Amino acid sequence: MNCPRCKSSSYNKNGKVDGRQRYKCQDCGYNYSVELKSTAFSTSVKRQALQLYLEGLGFRSIGRYLGVSHVSVQRWIKKFGQELEDLKSENEISVVKVDEMLTYIANKKNTAGSGLLLIELGKSSSTALLAAEEAKLEKLI
């Protein structure tokens, strides 16, 4: 354990702050602690923040609810959005037929407003694989 400022290995204990041991460098007099305070949040908190954002809550209200900074919430949402941009497929999927839903909707008398929301999550996702299999079946028929 060396001084972060002068890299000296001569130090003395200099009390505790917030449960962390503090040290004082004998060469330059710099006070430091080795143990870093962990401020990382679990993935479940980040997922909950994303879910609340998708439900329509603002960054500040999510931060108040979860007990975190609204800036942290904003960064998590922005990072998630950037990860989704990386997962976008190059091939655009226009129509995917799912047999059970097609049968269910076709048997209804009023089909107005009956639509499906399809969210593609990448080339290796189950939705993309479903579309690829559907395309193969249509070519065989």
Image (spheres, grey):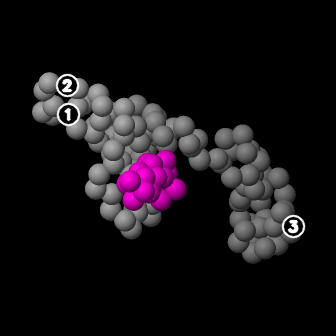
Residue 49, percent from left and from top: 43, 39
- Tell me: 11 left or right of 65: right
* View extreme (right): residue: 10
Q: Nearer the viewer, residue 80 or 75?
A: 80
Whether the residues at callouts 1 and 2 have beta carbons within 8 Å, the answer is yes
Mark 2 → mark 3, Cα distance in angstroms: 81 Å
Picture coordinates of residue 73 (x, y %)?
A: 41, 46
99 lies above or below 123: above
Span colored in magenta: 121-141
Q: Residue furthest bottom?
A: 6
The N terminus sits in image quarter: bottom right
Q: Residue 32 lies in what quarter of the image?
A: bottom right
Main secondary structure along the magenta-highlighted residues: helix
Amino acid identity at mark 2: Lys
Residue at figure coordinates x 71%, y 65% from the top left: 30
Mark 3 vs mark 1: in front: 1
Task: For label 2, count other residues whose C-alpha is less than 10 Å away and answer few (under 14), some (14-19) or many (20+).
Answer: few
Report how far apart the C-alphas of labels 1 and 2 lie in the structure.
10 Å
Considering only order in the chain, which callout, 1 or 3, is on the residue closer to the N terminus? 3
User: Foreground mark, 1 or 2?
Assistant: 2
Please say whether residue 117 is one of the residues in the magenta stretch.
Answer: no
Question: Of marks 1 and 2, which one's residue comes earlier in the chain?
Answer: 2
How many neighbours does mark 1 have within 10 angstroms: few (below 14), some (14-19), or many (20 or more)? few
Mark number for residue 114? 1
Residue 126 in the magenta stretch? The answer is: yes
Q: Nearer the viewer, residue 122 or 1?
A: 122
What is the secondary structure assignment of the residue under circle 2?
loop
Q: Nearer the viewer, residue 25 or 103?
A: 103
Check disc 2 and report the residue beneath it.
108
